[in-house]
Amino acid sequence: MSQNYENQSFTTSESHTSGEQWLVESNMRAEKMGSLSFWQNEYEKQFLKIKTCPLCGKVCKDQWKMEYKHKHSNECLKIQAENKGETYIPPSKRKVKCECGESVLFCNFPTHLESDKHKNKMKQDVLQCKICSKIFVGKRPRRDYEAHIKTGKHKKNLEISKIRSFEKLKQKTPTR
Ligand SMILES: [Zn+2]
Ligand SMILES: [Zn+2]
Ligand SMILES: [Zn+2]
């Protein structure tokens, strides 16, 4: 008998607890409902974040457009330059320095490599006095070069360079 009563009281207390729990849960539910706009805000913030270019800050239509169409595009590079207060020069308008010493537009570079101007300049490079670092530019660079190596200035430089290389050799040779 007494055992039965104890059981009953246990059931009562349990139902009491679950009743409390229900109250807590429904309160939480109500709280969640109330903060729905908060979550919506969070969602929109995240959505805005994933479609914003991390490089220039432009908000694109969606993440795909941002990642595959916009990021690193000419437009992106332009905004990046503007953000830094610089003027953007598209790659085709950029100048590159050729090994012949000429500055050429990037888009004209292949044509330049084929041009006579470039080829002549490269030929002249061969005609450089390695001792004096003098480059022979002109109509007859070979003749000028041959005249140059006979000059006193060149001979003097040649002597200096011989002494220098001899001294370097001495430094490299280990002393006993
Ligand atoms: Zn961008
Ligand atoms: Zn060149
Ligand atoms: Zn020389």
Image (cartoon, rainbow, N blue to C red):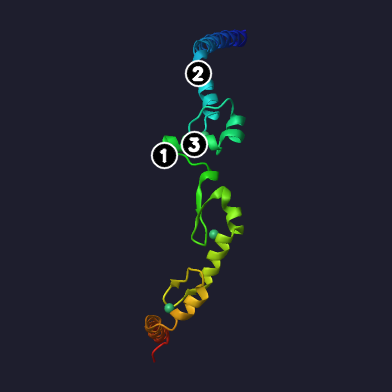
Q: Which residue is mark 3?
A: 78
Q: Looking at the image, which residue is at 48% across and 68% down?
A: 138
Q: Amino acid at mark 2?
A: Asn
Instruction: Evaluate whether residue 50 shows in this view.
Output: yes
x, y percent for residue 57: 48, 31
The residue furthest front is 139
Q: Secondary structure at mark 2?
A: helix
Mark number, residue 41: 2
Classify mark 1: helix, strand or loop: loop
Q: Position of residue 16 (x, y in %)?
A: 54, 8
Tell which circle, 1 or 3, labels the residue nearer the N-terminal end: 3
Residue at the location (61% across, 58% down)?
114
**Number of residue marks:** 3
Q: Quadrant of the N terminus?
A: top right
Location of residue 74 in the rendering, given as x and y in whole percent from the top left corner: 54, 37
**Type of amino acid at the residue the image marks with label 3:** Lys
Give how far apart the Cα atoms at labels 1 and 2 are: 35 Å
Q: Amino acid at mark 1?
A: Glu
Position above or below: 149 against 24 = below
Which residue is nearer to you in this view: 86 or 112?
112
Q: What number is the disc on residue 86? A: 1
Q: Which residue is at a point 55% across and 49% down the rendered structure image?
A: 106
Q: Which quarter of the figure is the C terminus placed in?
A: bottom left
In the rendered image of this protein, does residue 21 appear above or below residue 52? Answer: above
User: Do callouts 3 and 2 mark residues in contact (Cβ within 8 Å)?
Assistant: no
Q: Examine the rendering and report whether any part of residue 55 can be seen.
A: no
